[in-house]
Amino acid sequence: MKMISLGWRPSPADITAEHQLGELIAIYRPNSWTVFYVVSGSILGALAYGLFSEGGWFRLVAVLFGFVSLFLFYNVYANSWLFFSEGIVRRQGRRGKLIDYTEVVTLFADVRKVVVLLFGFIPLSGGKRQSYKLSLCKTVREMPLHFSDENLGRFLEGAVCRAQLPGLLENYRAQQDLNFGPLRISHSGICRTQKGLPLLANSGELGWAELHHMTVQRGHLCLYRQGQDRPWVQVACHKIPNFQTLLVLLVEKIGVSLMQTS
């Protein structure tokens, strides 16, 4: 991740040409911040107009309020995420963060619909979104993303999966353990790592030869042992980091059967 200069009105074509980011997939603007900037800018703009008409030193304050108002309105345009086929640009004003998909450490995807709240308690009109949390470093807090376009969410999961998979496969073939939050994959099988995780059958590690199939139902991943009808373990999908990567690894690379997805 590196900082880049974008200027006042950079076009996506200029950004991708300079940084080789490929095709522009979508531009995402956080709705809650957009409403905040519009409301705050409008209030300050009205105050600036009222103070300017008073004359005298009020006009100096009005000019200051006017500049702040313009800055807030500019942030409606400037505060955005640009998703390209080869990377992400997190734009903040005239500067931005250039993020390669290989730099994404964790991506949590909540398959449920959530309501986006302004200031933490005011629901936005039509605010139902798919909820994602993206982390670029284990020491940096997760960045929430709320997408109304389901295709954008699928693209982000797929891009992160494609970036992570080669390194994970190399580690797996070198017999290194792969951690996916409450689950851990080893060369011999899969086991739980989180205390309190619902373990509905037997404890310990489930070897690949013992694992019959898995399902994704009602937002939960269930693993089944050979000859048993009850899940060996059940985990909420939104609690598993890089869930799409885990599925592809288990199904396409290790050969686990995926049944009854919903």
Image: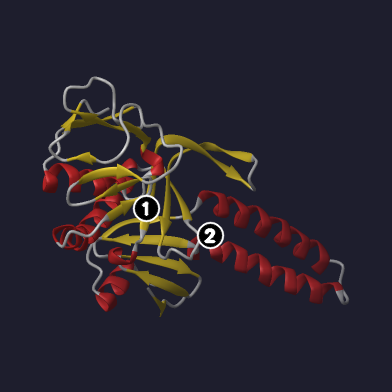
Residue under label 1: 107
Q: Position of residue 173 (x, y in %)?
A: 13, 59
Residue located 24% across and 54% down the image: 161
Residue at left 32%, top 32%?
A: 233
Q: Is residue 256 above or below residue 142?
A: above
Instruction: Tell me the amino acid under the disc marked 1.
Output: Leu
Dot in front, 2 or 1: 1
Mark nearer the N terminus (2 vs 1): 2
Taking depth in this image into account, of 254 and 5 the one nearest to the observer is 254
* Left or right for 239, reference 225: right
Image quadrant where residue 174 sits = bottom left
Q: Seen from this angle, which residue lies furthest top? A: 229
| Residue that numbered label 2 is attached to | 76
Name the spot of residue 66 as percent of width and height, x first: 70, 69
Q: Secondary structure at mark 1?
A: strand
Q: Tag 2: residue type?
A: Val
Mark 1, other Cα within 10 Å: few <14 / some 14–19 / many ≥20? many
Q: Which mark is residue 52?
A: none
Left/right placement of residue 136 relative to residue 152 reads right
Closer to the camera in the image, 122 or 12? 122
Give percent across and percent down for residue 150: 33, 41
Residue closer to the observer: 191 or 32 = 191
Q: Is residue 116 toward the left or the right of residue 87 in the image?
A: right
Q: How many marks?
A: 2
Q: Residue at x 14, y 34 (%)?
A: 257
Tell me if mark 2 has few (under 14), some (14-19) or many (20+) residues whose alpha carbon lies within 10 angstroms of its own. Answer: many
What residue is shown at x 24% (from left), y 65% (from top)? 86
* CA distance for labels 2 and 1: 26 Å
Q: Nearer the viewer, residue 168 or 106?
A: 168
Q: Secondary structure at mark 2?
A: helix
239, above or below 12, in the image: above
